[in-house]
Image (cartoon, rainbow, N blue to C red):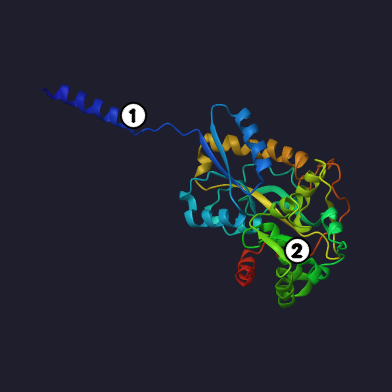
Amino acid sequence: MNVKKMILCLFAAALLAGFSGCKKESNRVVIYSTSEDFRIEHYQKRLNEQFPDYEVIVNYMPTGNLAAKLKAEGTKTDCDIIGELDTGYLEGLLDNLADLSAYDSSAFLDDLIPAHHKYLPWHRGSGCIIINEAFLAARNLPVPGSYDDLLKPEYKGVLSMPNPKSSSTGYYFLKNLVNTRGEDAAFAYFDGFAKNVLQFTSSGSGPVNALVQGEAGIGLGMTYQVVSTINKGVPLKIIYFEEGSPYSVYGLGIIKGKETRKAVRDVFEFYVTTLNREDKELFVPELIFKNQVNTMPNYPQNVRIADMTGIENLAEKQRLLEKWQY
C-alpha cells in the first residue's frame, strides 16, 4: 500500500470512529414528583399531547424518599426534572441543581423566588383540620375546637395525620406547633396525640383517603385535596384551630448537567409556563403568581396563616425529625 492510500485509509478510519462516537441526544425525560396521582395523571396527559416525539415519564415518590434519593445519587441520578419537592429539601440539594436564572420568573410573587435561582415556585401547600361529621355523629363525638381537644380519650383511633418524616404536610403541622408552643411542649403534645392516631400515613393525601373511606373521623391534611374531594360530592368539612393554617412551599428544578439537553429544556419550559398555571387553576389555587385569581368552589377564603418561621431551614427540619418517634 502506497503512502497516499495509507493516509486516505487512516483518514477514513478516523472519520468513522468520530461518527461512531457521536451519540444521538436522548429524547427521554424523567421527572420525579411528590404530587398526588390525579395531578400526575394530568401532567402526564398534557406532556404526551405537547411532546409526541419525546418519551416523558412522570414518576411519583413520597417527599422524604425523593429527597433521600436525590441526595444520595447527586447529578448521576436518572431524574432530569424535579417536578415537585418541598423547598426545604431543595435547599439541601443546591449543589445538584442547575442554575435557572435564564427562565423568566417575573410572574411569580417576589418573596417566592430564591436569590440563588436554583428552583422556581411550583405551589404553596396549606393545611387544615378535616372533619367527617357523619363518622363523629355515629359515635356521638363532638367536632373538636382545638388541638388540645384531640388528646381526649374519646378520640382514640379517630385521628389521622401524615408522618412528618415522609411527608412535608406532616412536617408543617409539627413545625407550627413547635413555633407556637415551644419544642418540648410540641413533642409532648404529639406523645399524647399519637395515642389517639389510627395511622400516621406515609403521604399527605393519606388522612383525606382515610376519612373518605370511613376509617377515621378527623384528619390533619392538605386544604386543596379536601376541597377537591368536597367538590366531587363527598361530605367533608374544613375547620381551623386558633393557630391558623400551616403551609410550606414546593419548587421545581433541573438536575445540574441535564439542562444542556433540548428535550429537558423544552419540557421544563412547558412546566413553568403552562402546567404550573393549569395546576393552580385545577388543583392548588393558593397564590404563587402576581395576577393569580382563585375561582375554585368551596376553597376557604381569608384564612389566618399559621406561624411557619423557619419552615425552609433544612438543618432545623432534620434535627426535629430525628426527635420524631412515630
Give the labeled residue for mark 1: 19
Identity of the residue drawn at 65% across and 38% down: 41
Task: Give the x, y percent position of residue 88.
Answer: 64, 59
Q: Are the residues flagged by discs 2 and 1 in contact, CB closer than 8 Å?
A: no
Residue drawn at (80%, 62%), measured in percent from left and top?
306
From the image, tell me which residue sits under label 2.
308
> For the N terminus, which image quadrant?
top left
Residue 3 placement (x, y as % from top left): 13, 25
Q: Determine whether 225 is above or below 278 in the image.
A: below
Q: Residues within 10 Å of mark 2 (few under 14, many from 20)?
A: some
What amino acid is labelled 1 in the image?
A: Phe
Mark 2 vs mark 1, foreground winner is: 2
Task: Indicate the quadrant where residue 230 lies.
Answer: top right
Residue furthest out toward the bottom? 184
Rendered position, 60 above or below 27: below
Indicate the quadrant where residue 162 lies.
Answer: bottom right
Q: On the picture, is 70 further left or further right than 124?
A: left
Where residue 221 sits, quadrant-wise, is: bottom right
Q: How far apart are marks 2 and 1 (CA)?
A: 56 Å
Q: Position of residue 325 (x, y in %)?
A: 62, 70
**Residue type indicated by callout 2:** Met
Disc 1: CA contacts within 10 A as few (<14), some (14-19) or many (>=20): few
**42 or 197: nearer the eye?**
197
Q: Which residue is drawn at 73% across and 44% down?
A: 106
- Which element is circle 1 on? helix
Q: Which mark is residue 304?
A: none
